[in-house]
Image (cartoon, grey):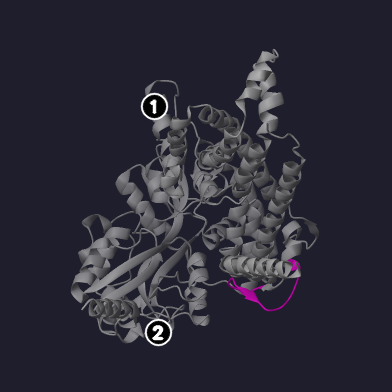
Amino acid sequence: MSGAAEVMETQARRDVRNRWLLSLPALLIILLAASGPLLIVLVYSFLTPGPYGDVQWQPTVSGWINVFLERDIFDETLSLADAHVSIFIRSVWLSLVTTVLTLLVGFPTAYFIATRPDNSRELWLFLITIPFWTNLLIRTFAILQIIRNEGLINNLMIDLGLFARPVQMLFTDGAILTGMVYVYLPLMVLPLYASMEKLDFRLVEAGYDLYATPFRVLRRIIVPLVKPGIIAGSILVFIPALGAYVTPSILGGGKNLMLGNLIELQFGQGRNWPLGAALSITLMLIVMVALLFYVRNARGSGVRHG
Amino acid sequence: MKRIRITLAITAALLASTGLAHAEGVLNIYNWGNYTSPEMIKKFEDQYKVKVTITDYDSNDTALAKVRQGGSGFDMVVPSQNYVPIWISEGLLLETDPGKMENFKNVAEQWKNPVFDPDRKYTVPWAMGIVGTVVNTDVYKGDINTWGIIFDTPEELKGKVNVVPEMTDVIDAAVLYNGGTKCTGDLTILKKVRDTLVKAKPNWVAMEYGTIEKMGSGDFAASSDWNGSAFRQRLANPKIKFGYPKEGFVNWSDNLAVLKDAANVENAKLFQNFMMDPENAGMNSAFHRYANGVAGSEAFMPADMKDAPEIKIPDEFASKGVPSQTCPPEVQELYTKIWTELQK
């Protein structure tokens, strides 16, 4: 008896060891490629900015203080850094609106795909992934061509006599939102679809059998069951939108910054790397809060399938 | 047999990547976007059997930040004169001594011994110009020779003005507009500068570099801009005119230098010498439409460049130009703070 237990125990130990060995490459990559640079960012955020970018090895917390507080250039009073705060608020607001819009567009799309016959679903999914074939920059410039003053929409509207002169669409918040919704839509549709695919549509039918209105079926049956997909999709859209750089800088005209652009500014013309590093970490903290919210909600969604 | 072939291939790849010391090989130039004549590069490539690769940057700070990190892989860079002393003091440039090169005799007298690079130990003139305004005169008929276009935007231009976001250019312009001198440390002036900029920004539509394309397409009706860029815009649309701000404007030059960690030093030196040949400099000007500081190059420029209003400064404005220079670090810091505040 004891011999068999010993054999099993050795076997189990070997299994554990093998598992560790097998995951070692991945762990090393995470350690070196993710944690390493992050540590550098963290250390840099506590250093003094060098005269032409880079850092000097004198520890200070001024980078962190500058994230939220600023000393007035002229009278030295310390006040809330409303430049940064307003950019933070702008970014969070634009990302939230992007998330809501992608959800509004993505939900029906995912539902449509999930309700197609088995053999045609793959085709629809395939169509969703087509935009990924083209580089993000090129897609963004394509939007620019469409909405600019002498672009497709304005020219068409003027030709039709609907507009007297071009309507300014490029370089507005609306342009940034359009670009971001377009870019992040697949990231919303795919997790939503993954959830809906598992949805037991007999439950929907049962709802109708019990005289539920379509809206009620949606609210009481479908949404609770696909809630993990909604949350996953929202997180997948919200997080990259928060750090978006290319879309706001091309479609926003570089005038109204988002967080990504503000951070870039500190490493370029701003020549304040510690502040840039501190801002990056602040952004990560916001993302972490969003993720914690996700984890709590994902665990809290008590409805089980079947 | 197969192994030999592989060995040969690897050797060839290694040779290609190390960059050979003699003239045949490659040259990597890091330059401002839309600033290098393709025909001229073709001529250099054919003449010296060198493959030239050009990579773009859009601001002095971007270029400086990238190269300072080392391992950029570039051989040459074209910093503005106010940045040249920084590049030199940071030890980023190779002392190639262009002042002793064969074609140096062609460099115009006033560019032979500039303040930013005494005796031309490091750099060769690439182009020189002015920071002013461009206005589409179909949209606005008033006086365009003022920074008021940008800082007190007339009604017709509101929401249609772009500002090229080269920090020093913008703040210098606002300093001159408020009656200050370039690189001033005077806090009363700088406070006015900040207020001017913050008040002006809501009337701007964008802060971008791509003015040649976007002025042409009507996305912008006015912009702060450089004169050569304005020239190219006028060639595309005759209604686009360059304004010489009467409050004062900055004269700048960009200069071709070799990086200390360049892999292809010999080719880079050949290119520095090549650029001081009037024919080549003229060819480059025909593309970027700026003056180039090489005497006799006018003969190789298109006829329309001689009397172009963007190149030939009108007499009444000739005295308004101030040379671009490196500001002291404490002034630079104030500039940066004002700039960040402007980015809200």
**Chain for numbered disc 1:** A
Left or right: B128 as drawn, with respect to A77:
left
Closest to the observer, B110 or B128: B128
The N terminus of chain A - image quarter? bottom right
Q: Amino acid at mark 2?
A: Lys
The C terminus of chain A - image quarter? top right
How packed mark 2 is, by other alpha carbons closer than 10 Å (few <14, some 14-19, many 20 or more), is some
Q: Is residue A66 magenta?
A: no
What residue appears at the point 39 percent right and 68 percent down from the top-left corner?
B30
Q: Amino acid at mark 1?
A: Leu
Provide the secondary structure element on which disc 1 rests: helix
Q: How far from the left and from the top, in percent, is residue B208?
A: 49, 51
Image vertical order of residue A109 relative to residue A3, above or below: above
Residue A156 image label: 1
Name the image quarter holding residue B193: bottom right
Closest to the observer, B97 or B24: B24
Q: CA distance from mark 1 to mark 2?
A: 57 Å
Left or right: A121 as drawn, with respect to A66:
left
Q: Which residue is mark 2?
A: B121
The extreme left residue here reads: B47
Closest to the observer, B260 or B84: B260
Provide the secondary structure element on which disc 2 rests: loop
